[in-house]
Structure formats: structure tokens, C-alpha cells
Image (tube, rainbow, N blue to C red):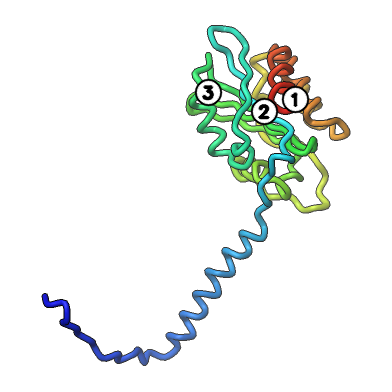
Amino acid sequence: MPDDFDLELPNLGDDRPGLDELEDADELVVGGDDDDEDDDYPDDATEDDVDLIVALYREDGQPMVVALDLDLVNDLDALITQLRRIPGDGGALAMVSIATEMFVIVRVRGRHVQVLLSDVVEAADWPLARDVVDYLGLEVPDDDEDSYPVGDLDLLADVGLPDFELEAIASAYDEDTTTLLEQVAKRIKFGPQYTKTVAAAFE
């Protein structure tokens, strides 16, 4: 076809009644939903907000603790994917502490995923906490709701930390969450490795 060939069709318009109003309404509805969702979702945690993010696993029976990428503190799905890449005996565990106010524990064993959030109220402030609440199918609490842990309190029961003891640790809201996670690591026999890794990577 020659380059100078140009065909213009007449614009006949559309005289269906109410079409313009319908299009405007659709734009308002779609745009409104996106704006509300963006306004509702918490801002990402920054490097300064992150106390620690580590993975714990066993290799040939030996306890191993490694620091994880800080970007993972804002995305539960990405964190789960990373844990699946760790060739640990019987899966891997992640511990995350943010702003010394909340912690998240994620345990991945093949397709089996368990999560624990120390304080459900933090879902309004931190993306990872919100992701956990969404993953569990829970509602984001109101600002005036009392704090309480949510998720799988028994996720470490088979490695030495019963659900009632983990609940007591998670509910100690006057304590620094890095201290609480250190208690967890010691109870499941990762204490020295945990302390060494956190000191080297985050202090």
C-alpha cells in the first residue's frame, strides 16, 4: 500500500442516550476504588524501620542462620518464595522484626506455609503485617482494637516451643521484639547462630 494513502472515515459519533454519562461513571468507580485501596495500604518499611530479617534452617542437622534481603520485609509472597529456595532439612523459617514493635515468623516446608504476626493491630501500619492478615483471611482491625497475635501459634511446637509459650512471647508488648525473637531462637536451639548473624548484619 502506498505511503501517501490515507483513508479517513467520517466520525458518526454515538447518539445512544446516556453513553457519555455511563463512561464518566465507570471512570469514577474504577478510579475511586484504586485511590481508596492505595490510601488504605500502609507505606513500605524503610531500611531504618527494619530491626532484622533472617532465615533459620538446618543443613546436615546443623543450625544455620543467614540475613535476608531487606526488600523482603514488605512482601510476604516474595519472602515465602525465598524460603522455598533454601535447601534446608525440613524447610526454612524466617524471622522479621520491624520498628521493635512487631514481629512476623514464617515457616515453609514444601507447599506447607505457616505464618504468625505478633500484633494484629500493626496490619494498619506495615505491609508485611497487612500481608499476613490478608493471607489468614482476616479483617484489618480498627485503630482502637486491642493487640493480640494472629496466625499459627503452633508452628514451632514440633521443634520445642509449644503454642501457649509462643503466644506468651508474642503477647509481651512491653518488650523489644528483637529480644522476643532472640528468646524464640534460643528455645528452638538456634541461639548462638542467631545472635552472631543479627549482630553482624543488623547492629
Is label 1 in a helix, a strand or a loop?
Answer: helix
- Residue beneath the point at 81% across and 41% down: 147
Judge the density around disc 2: few (<14), some (14-19), many (≥20) Cα neighbours within 10 Å: many
Residue linked to disc 2: 95
Q: Of callouts 3 and 1, which one flags the residue occurring earlier in the amino acid sequence?
A: 3
Considering only vertical position in the picture, is 58 above or below 110? above
Q: Label 1 sits on what residue type?
A: Leu
Is label 3 in a helix, a strand or a loop?
Answer: strand
Look at the image and tell me in which quarter the C terminus lies: top right
Q: Label 2 sits on what residue type?
A: Met
Q: Label 3 sits on what residue type?
A: Arg
Q: Of callouts 3 and 2, which one flags the residue occurring earlier in the amino acid sequence?
A: 2
Residue linked to disc 1: 181
Labelled disc at residue 109: 3
- 22 left or right of 2? right
- Mark 3–mark 2 Cα distance, whole angstroms, equals 15 Å
Which mark's residue is nearer the viewer, 3 or 1?
Answer: 1
- Residue beneath the point at 48% across and 28% down: 111
Position of residue 106 measured from the top left corner of the image (x, y, whole percent): 62, 30
- Residue beneath the point at 66% across and 30% down: 53
